[in-house]
Image (spheres, rainbow, N blue to C red):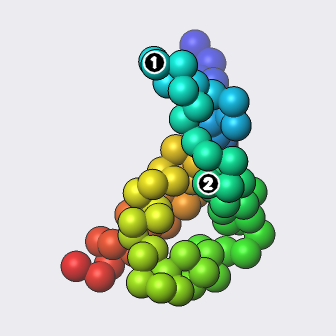
């Protein structure tokens, strides 16, 4: 019986859309909030975790922002953040 090689597939979550609605048919995100979250989603890999964290944490609200935009963060970002938090504790 041949053994099949397994490939690691990169999972890229699809972020919520600008026109997504909740159960009450209201928009889930304000336009500027959605645009900021998409900036982080699109530029996390380009800028790197340290630079993005520096930008988000400028006014010491980085953790709050990351919680608010959790649906938008790429998988790599979530993995990096969990490693950093384990390293600090």
Q: Residue at x 42, y 76 (%)?
A: 61
Residue placed most toward the observer, 23 or 54: 23
Residue 82 in sight from this viewpoint: yes
Residue 50 in sight from this viewpoint: no
Q: Is residue 71 left or right of residue 9?
A: left
Quarter that holds the N terminus = top right
Q: Which residue is drawn at 42% across and 84% down?
A: 60
Q: Position of residue 48 (x, y in %)?
A: 67, 74
36 in relation to 6, above or below: below
Q: Position of residue 57 (x, y in %)?
A: 49, 81
Q: Say which mark, if any, is on residue 23.
A: 1
Residue placed most toward the observer, 74 or 60: 60
Mark 2 and mark 1 residues within 8 Å of each other at the beta carbon = no
- Marks 2 and 1 sit apart, C-alpha to C-alpha, by 19 Å
Quarter that holds the C terminus = bottom left
8 in relation to 77, above or below: above
Question: Which residue is tagged 2?
Answer: 33
54 in relation to 43, above or below: below
Residue placed most toward the observer, 9 or 16: 16
Residue neighbourhood size for the residue with mark 1, other residues' Cα within 10 Å, grouped as few (<14), some (14–19), many (≥20):
few
Q: What element carries label 1?
A: loop
Q: Position of residue 65 (x, y in %)?
A: 47, 64
Residue 77 placement: quadrant: bottom right
Q: Say which mark, if any, is on residue 36.
A: none
Q: Which residue lies furthest to the top in this view?
A: 1
Residue 16 placement: quadrant: top right
Q: Which residue is drawn at 52% across and 44% down?
A: 71
């Amino acid at each position: 019986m041949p053994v099949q090689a397994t490939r690691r597939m990169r999972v890229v979550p699809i972020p919520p859309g600008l026109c997504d609605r909740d159960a009450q048919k209201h928009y889930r995100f304000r336009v500027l909030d959605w645009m900021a979250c998409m900036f982080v989603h699109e530029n996390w890999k380009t800028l790197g975790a340290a630079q993005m964290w520096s930008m988000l944490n400028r006014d010491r609200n980085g953790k709050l922002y990351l919680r608010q935009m959790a649906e938008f963060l790429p998988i790599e970002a979530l993995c990096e953040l969990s490693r950093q938090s384990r390293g600090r504790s």
